[in-house]
Image (cartoon, helix red, strand yellow):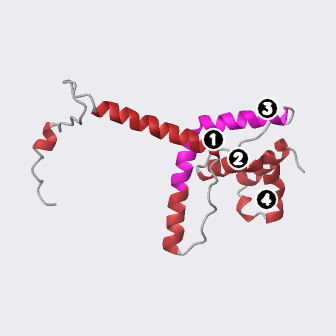
Amino acid sequence: MLSLATATRDYARFVENMTFDRLPLSILARISEPMGPEIWAWQYALRLTRGSPWRARPLIDERVERALATRSMIEGIETWTRAMAVLDERVEQARVYGWPMPQPLAVPDEIRAALQARDAAALERIRRRRGRTGEGETGTAAVPDDAVHRPPFPGRPA
């Protein structure tokens, strides 16, 4: 079995040379096995978003590299969000045009938890903002600006 550093280096070379999509399953299995499912999924997310492939350093303990990769995956949560959006677009295009369906993105549990926590925090911020009416009320207090009350007259036809 390849080392993590060798597998990520080979993977990056295939992606950068634009030969990854033509690799036989035997080579894909050989380079994905040392990475494991989480890093392999992260590499796919980076590929979907046109990010640079991640490479493990060859002289560093693999446990340290895996821990650093996990931290980078969680800190780069926007990459996962963009990757899911890109994948949704590709699935829709494949459905409409009859193309082959792209591979699904296996989002690791840590990333799912981070996405859910981020979404919950955003909903809480929205809830707090809506509760600010200045008079102690807890209901929504959205007041449209003048442009909404008085929309402009339609322009002349071109």
Residue occupied by mark 4: 28
- How much space separates mark 2 and mark 4, taking CA atoms? 15 Å
- How much space separates mark 1 and mark 2, taking CA atoms? 10 Å
Residue occupied by mark 1: 110
Question: Which circle's residue, 4 or 1, is located before the other in the chain?
Answer: 4
**Which residue type does callout 2 highlight?**
Glu
In this rendering, the answer to whether 141 lies above or below 153 is above
Q: Is residue 130 magenta?
A: no
- How much space separates mark 4 and mark 1, taking CA atoms? 24 Å
Magenta residues? 61-86
Q: Residues within 10 Å of mark 3 (few under 14, many from 20)?
A: few
Residue drawn at the location 13% of the way across and 60% of the way down: 157
Check if mark 1's residue and mark 2's residue have beta carbons within 8 Å.
yes
**Which residue type does callout 1 highlight?**
Glu
Q: Is residue 78 magenta?
A: yes
Question: Which circle's residue, 2 or 4, is located before the other in the chain?
Answer: 4
- How much space separates mark 3 and mark 1, taking CA atoms? 17 Å
User: The C terminus appears in which quarter of the rendering?
Assistant: bottom left
Question: Which circle's residue, 4 or 3, is located before the other in the chain?
Answer: 4
Percent position of residue 28, x then y: 79, 59
| Tag shown at residue 38 | 2
Residue drawn at the location 13% of the way across and 37% of the way down: 146
Check if mark 4's residue and mark 3's residue have beta carbons within 8 Å.
no
Q: Secondary structure at mark 4?
A: helix
- How much space separates mark 4 and mark 3, taking CA atoms? 24 Å
